[in-house]
Amino acid sequence: MYIPEHFKIIDEEMIYDIIKENGFATLFAQHQGHPNATHIPLTLDKEKGYLYGHFARPNEQWKDIEKQEILAVFHGPHCYISPSWYETDRAVPTWNYVAVHVYGQVEIIDGEELVDSLRDMVLKYENPNSSYKFDQVDSRFMEGMTKGIVGFRIKINKIEGKAKLSQNHSVDRLELVIQQLEQSGSEDDHKIACLMKENLRKKS
């Protein structure tokens, strides 16, 4: 990923937070000699250094993915920045965003490790008050369902994080952009504004 130095995320915890908060990733690999991508939820085990997920078995990307160097992209909030928000007309439109790229090798998993990864994903996303309880699902039904998927883990080799938050502009201009974003009805605009304000606080 192209990352100018002032956009590089050096805070490891911020990188892990982006992965956890934006777990629906895009997984890129080669399949039969061509680029291939799957949009897929991934969960992180920071201590072990793995991402976990599963393919639908009919998705043939899994068949030749092992031992490849794959790329998982986690897309954080993003938004358009209008030059009309600045104090000058000597500016151009741009886009602010946050993203993390994870590189590693895929290992196919099954059995208890697959079930554990499914449980972790459900616990992450299911409302604690939900009537659905993973461990109460009929074991024969669960066994049948897991035959329709292929579980995997990604051994993380490298992580890159980028936060393009107008760091290359003056404080006055940053405050003007934040003001405009906070007036928007977009959730992503508000998230970018919060990240920009946090950067400003770190500078002060």
Image (cartoon, rainbow, N blue to C red):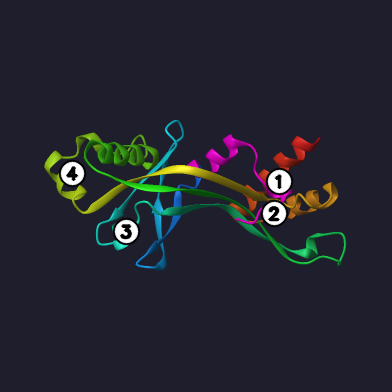
Q: Nearer the viewer, mark 2 or mark 3?
A: 3
Q: In the image, what residue type sits under mark 4?
A: Met
**Quarter occupied by residue 2:** bottom right
Q: Earlier in the sequence, mark 1 or mark 2?
A: 2
Q: Nearer the viewer, mark 1 or mark 3?
A: 3
User: Horizontal and vertical percent for residue 123?
Assistant: 35, 37
Q: Which secondary structure lies at badge 3? A: helix
Q: Which residues are magenta?
A: 1-20
38 is within the stretch colored magenta: no
How packed is label 4: few (under 14 Cα within 10 Å), some, or many (20 or more)? Answer: few
Q: Which secondary structure lies at badge 4? A: helix
Q: In the image, what residue type sits under mark 3?
A: Asp
Location of mark 2 (residue): 181
| Tag of residue 64 | 3
Tell me what residue is drawn at x 86 percent, y 66 percent. 90
Tell me what residue is drawn at x 32 percent, y 58 percent. 64
Q: Which secondary structure lies at badge 2? A: helix
Are the residues flagged by discs 1 and 2 in contact, CB closer than 8 Å?
A: yes
On-image quarter of the C terminus: top right
Position of residue 183 relative to residue 91, above or below, is above
Spatial separation of the CA atoms under disc 2 and disc 3 = 44 Å
